[in-house]
Amino acid sequence: MTVRVRALCLLVAHMLLAARALVAADNALTDSSEAAEELKALRDQTIVRSGVWIDTEWDQFDGGAEKAKWTLAGLWGWHVRERQDAGLRLKLPFVYNRSDASSGQQDTGGVGDIEIGAGTAFLLNDKWRTAAGVELHADTASNPALGDSMWRLKPAWGVAHDFTKWLTVTFNAEYNYSIAEEHNAPPQRYGELSLPATFILPYDWALSP
Protein backbone atom coordinates (compact mmCIF):
# COMPACT_ATOMS: atom_id res chain seq x y z
CA MET A 1 0.00 0.00 0.00
CA THR A 2 2.87 2.37 0.86
CA VAL A 3 4.56 1.64 -2.48
CA ARG A 4 1.39 2.44 -4.37
CA VAL A 5 0.91 5.74 -2.48
CA ARG A 6 4.54 6.66 -3.10
CA ALA A 7 4.21 5.86 -6.80
CA LEU A 8 1.02 7.90 -7.01
CA CYS A 9 2.73 10.85 -5.33
CA LEU A 10 5.63 10.61 -7.77
CA LEU A 11 3.19 10.51 -10.71
CA VAL A 12 1.37 13.60 -9.45
CA ALA A 13 4.67 15.39 -8.89
CA HIS A 14 5.81 14.58 -12.46
CA MET A 15 2.50 15.80 -13.84
CA LEU A 16 2.80 19.08 -11.91
CA LEU A 17 6.37 19.57 -13.16
CA ALA A 18 5.29 18.85 -16.72
CA ALA A 19 2.41 21.31 -16.48
CA ARG A 20 4.74 23.94 -15.07
CA ALA A 21 7.18 23.34 -17.94
CA LEU A 22 4.39 23.66 -20.47
CA VAL A 23 3.26 26.96 -18.96
CA ALA A 24 6.82 28.26 -18.99
CA ALA A 25 7.26 27.20 -22.62
CA ASP A 26 3.98 28.83 -23.56
CA ASN A 27 5.05 32.08 -21.87
CA ALA A 28 8.38 31.89 -23.67
CA LEU A 29 6.63 31.44 -27.01
CA THR A 30 4.35 34.37 -26.23
CA ASP A 31 7.31 36.58 -25.33
CA SER A 32 9.11 35.44 -28.49
CA SER A 33 6.04 36.20 -30.62
CA GLU A 34 5.69 39.66 -29.09
CA ALA A 35 9.37 40.35 -29.70
CA ALA A 36 9.01 39.18 -33.30
CA GLU A 37 6.00 41.46 -33.80
CA GLU A 38 7.91 44.41 -32.35
CA LEU A 39 10.89 43.67 -34.62
CA LYS A 40 8.55 43.33 -37.62
CA ALA A 41 6.92 46.67 -36.78
CA LEU A 42 10.36 48.31 -36.74
CA ARG A 43 11.27 46.84 -40.13
CA ASP A 44 7.95 47.21 -41.94
CA GLN A 45 6.86 50.41 -43.61
CA THR A 46 4.96 52.73 -41.28
CA ILE A 47 4.14 55.66 -43.62
CA VAL A 48 3.89 54.25 -47.15
CA ARG A 49 1.36 51.41 -47.04
CA SER A 50 1.32 48.84 -49.85
CA GLY A 51 -2.05 48.25 -51.43
CA VAL A 52 -4.25 48.01 -54.52
CA TRP A 53 -7.37 50.09 -55.18
CA ILE A 54 -9.74 51.36 -57.87
CA ASP A 55 -10.69 55.03 -58.36
CA THR A 56 -13.83 56.10 -60.22
CA GLU A 57 -14.28 59.53 -61.85
CA TRP A 58 -17.24 60.82 -63.87
CA ASP A 59 -17.49 64.16 -65.70
CA GLN A 60 -20.34 65.80 -67.61
CA PHE A 61 -19.70 68.62 -70.08
CA ASP A 62 -21.78 71.29 -71.82
CA GLY A 63 -23.82 69.82 -74.64
CA GLY A 64 -24.34 66.44 -72.96
CA ALA A 65 -20.92 64.86 -73.47
CA GLU A 66 -19.76 62.57 -70.65
CA LYS A 67 -16.52 60.97 -69.57
CA ALA A 68 -16.05 58.07 -67.15
CA LYS A 69 -12.67 56.85 -65.91
CA TRP A 70 -11.83 53.82 -63.80
CA THR A 71 -8.23 53.75 -62.55
CA LEU A 72 -6.62 50.56 -61.25
CA ALA A 73 -3.76 51.62 -58.98
CA GLY A 74 -1.13 49.78 -56.99
CA LEU A 75 1.35 51.06 -54.40
CA TRP A 76 4.39 49.12 -53.19
CA GLY A 77 6.07 50.54 -50.10
CA TRP A 78 9.11 49.41 -48.18
CA HIS A 79 11.07 50.47 -45.11
CA VAL A 80 14.33 52.31 -45.84
CA ARG A 81 15.55 53.15 -42.37
CA GLU A 82 14.18 54.42 -39.08
CA ARG A 83 11.45 57.02 -39.76
CA GLN A 84 11.78 56.72 -43.57
CA ASP A 85 9.82 54.72 -46.14
CA ALA A 86 9.89 54.66 -49.94
CA GLY A 87 7.31 53.66 -52.50
CA LEU A 88 6.47 53.00 -56.15
CA ARG A 89 3.02 53.64 -57.60
CA LEU A 90 1.40 52.57 -60.88
CA LYS A 91 -1.92 53.86 -62.26
CA LEU A 92 -3.67 52.14 -65.18
CA PRO A 93 -6.80 54.04 -66.31
CA PHE A 94 -9.68 52.76 -68.40
CA VAL A 95 -11.67 55.58 -70.05
CA TYR A 96 -15.04 55.77 -71.76
CA ASN A 97 -16.11 58.93 -73.65
CA ARG A 98 -19.75 59.46 -74.61
CA SER A 99 -20.06 62.21 -77.24
CA ASP A 100 -22.91 64.68 -77.41
CA ALA A 101 -25.50 64.26 -80.16
CA SER A 102 -24.55 67.46 -82.02
CA SER A 103 -20.86 66.55 -82.49
CA GLY A 104 -21.55 63.53 -84.66
CA GLN A 105 -18.58 61.69 -83.13
CA GLN A 106 -18.71 58.08 -82.00
CA ASP A 107 -18.43 56.95 -78.41
CA THR A 108 -14.88 55.84 -77.54
CA GLY A 109 -13.48 53.53 -74.88
CA GLY A 110 -10.12 52.01 -74.05
CA VAL A 111 -6.92 52.42 -72.05
CA GLY A 112 -5.89 55.91 -70.97
CA ASP A 113 -2.49 57.40 -70.08
CA ILE A 114 -0.49 55.30 -67.61
CA GLU A 115 1.20 57.09 -64.68
CA ILE A 116 4.26 55.82 -62.79
CA GLY A 117 5.50 57.53 -59.62
CA ALA A 118 8.27 57.13 -57.05
CA GLY A 119 8.89 58.92 -53.79
CA THR A 120 9.98 58.79 -50.17
CA ALA A 121 8.31 59.75 -46.89
CA PHE A 122 9.66 60.73 -43.50
CA LEU A 123 8.10 60.45 -40.04
CA LEU A 124 9.16 63.69 -38.34
CA ASN A 125 7.52 62.86 -35.01
CA ASP A 126 4.35 61.20 -33.74
CA LYS A 127 2.14 63.91 -35.35
CA TRP A 128 4.03 65.23 -38.41
CA ARG A 129 4.94 63.48 -41.69
CA THR A 130 6.38 64.75 -44.96
CA ALA A 131 6.88 63.20 -48.40
CA ALA A 132 8.27 64.10 -51.82
CA GLY A 133 8.35 62.36 -55.17
CA VAL A 134 7.94 62.61 -58.92
CA GLU A 135 5.37 61.07 -61.27
CA LEU A 136 5.65 60.38 -65.01
CA HIS A 137 2.46 60.78 -67.05
CA ALA A 138 3.02 58.67 -70.20
CA ASP A 139 1.29 59.06 -73.57
CA THR A 140 -0.03 55.49 -73.74
CA ALA A 141 -3.73 56.00 -74.52
CA SER A 142 -5.19 53.54 -77.04
CA ASN A 143 -6.99 56.50 -78.67
CA PRO A 144 -5.87 60.18 -78.67
CA ALA A 145 -9.33 61.15 -77.39
CA LEU A 146 -8.75 59.13 -74.22
CA GLY A 147 -5.50 60.81 -73.16
CA ASP A 148 -3.62 64.12 -73.00
CA SER A 149 -1.36 63.40 -76.03
CA MET A 150 1.79 64.26 -74.09
CA TRP A 151 4.50 63.05 -71.75
CA ARG A 152 4.42 65.02 -68.51
CA LEU A 153 6.45 65.13 -65.29
CA LYS A 154 4.89 66.02 -61.95
CA PRO A 155 7.20 66.63 -58.96
CA ALA A 156 5.28 66.94 -55.72
CA TRP A 157 5.79 67.62 -52.02
CA GLY A 158 3.44 67.32 -49.07
CA VAL A 159 3.29 67.59 -45.29
CA ALA A 160 0.65 66.10 -42.99
CA HIS A 161 -0.29 66.81 -39.38
CA ASP A 162 -2.44 64.67 -37.08
CA PHE A 163 -4.49 67.14 -35.05
CA THR A 164 -6.35 64.32 -33.28
CA LYS A 165 -6.68 60.54 -33.63
CA TRP A 166 -9.55 61.10 -36.06
CA LEU A 167 -8.44 64.23 -38.00
CA THR A 168 -5.43 64.67 -40.31
CA VAL A 169 -4.80 67.74 -42.49
CA THR A 170 -2.37 67.59 -45.42
CA PHE A 171 -0.83 70.35 -47.55
CA ASN A 172 0.20 69.27 -51.06
CA ALA A 173 2.10 71.22 -53.73
CA GLU A 174 2.49 69.85 -57.28
CA TYR A 175 4.00 71.22 -60.49
CA ASN A 176 3.09 69.77 -63.89
CA TYR A 177 5.14 70.36 -67.04
CA SER A 178 5.10 68.54 -70.36
CA ILE A 179 8.33 67.19 -71.83
CA ALA A 180 6.92 65.93 -75.17
CA GLU A 181 3.66 66.66 -76.99
CA GLU A 182 1.84 64.66 -79.66
CA HIS A 183 -1.06 65.40 -82.07
CA ASN A 184 -0.45 69.18 -81.91
CA ALA A 185 -1.18 69.32 -78.19
CA PRO A 186 -0.03 72.62 -76.59
CA PRO A 187 2.74 72.52 -73.95
CA GLN A 188 1.56 72.56 -70.34
CA ARG A 189 3.00 74.36 -67.33
CA TYR A 190 0.88 74.67 -64.20
CA GLY A 191 0.95 74.19 -60.44
CA GLU A 192 -1.59 72.71 -58.05
CA LEU A 193 -2.11 73.37 -54.34
CA SER A 194 -4.48 71.36 -52.17
CA LEU A 195 -5.39 71.14 -48.48
CA PRO A 196 -7.41 67.96 -47.92
CA ALA A 197 -8.60 66.86 -44.49
CA THR A 198 -9.03 63.18 -43.58
CA PHE A 199 -11.61 62.14 -40.98
CA ILE A 200 -11.03 58.66 -39.56
CA LEU A 201 -14.37 56.86 -39.12
CA PRO A 202 -15.21 53.58 -37.33
CA TYR A 203 -14.85 50.19 -39.01
CA ASP A 204 -11.78 51.18 -41.13
CA TRP A 205 -13.64 53.95 -43.03
CA ALA A 206 -12.30 57.43 -43.78
CA LEU A 207 -13.65 60.62 -45.38
CA SER A 208 -11.48 63.21 -47.19
CA PRO A 209 -13.08 66.48 -48.33
Image: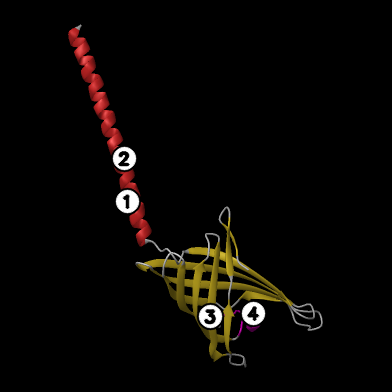
The amino acid on which the numbered mark 1 sits, given as a three-letter code, is Ala
In this rendering, is residue 47 above or below 158?
above
Q: CA distance from mark 4 to mark 2?
A: 61 Å
Q: Is 145 on the left-hand or right-hand side of 64?
A: left
Q: Measuring 63% from the left and 74% from the top, which residue is drawn there?
A: 110
Determine whether the residue tagged by mark 3 lies in a helix, strand or loop: strand
The residue indicated by pointer 3 is 173
In this rendering, is residue 72 above or below 177?
above
Q: Which badge, 1 or 3, is on the more N-terminal residue?
A: 1
In this rendering, is residue 69 above or below 45?
below
The one nearer the camera, 128 or 8, is 128
Of labels 1 and 4, the one closer to you: 1
Circle 2 packing at 10 Å, graded few (<14), some (14-19), many (20+), is few
Circle 1 packing at 10 Å, graded few (<14), some (14-19), many (20+), is few
User: What percent of the width, then of the height, locates residue 101?
Assistant: 81, 79
Circle 3 packing at 10 Å, graded few (<14), some (14-19), many (20+), is some
Determine whether the residue tagged by mark 2 lies in a helix, strand or loop: helix
* Image quarter of the N terminus: top left
Q: Quadrant of residue 206?
A: bottom right
Q: Which badge, 1 or 4, is on the more N-terminal residue?
A: 1
Q: CA distance from mark 1 to mark 3?
A: 40 Å
The residue indicated by pointer 1 is 35
The one nearer the camera, 38 or 135, is 38
Q: Are marks 2 and 3 in contact (CB under 8 Å)?
A: no
* Image quarter of the C terminus: bottom right
- Res 146 label: 4
Q: Are marks 1 and 3 in contact (CB under 8 Å)?
A: no
The residue indicated by pointer 2 is 27
Determine whether the residue tagged by mark 4 lies in a helix, strand or loop: helix
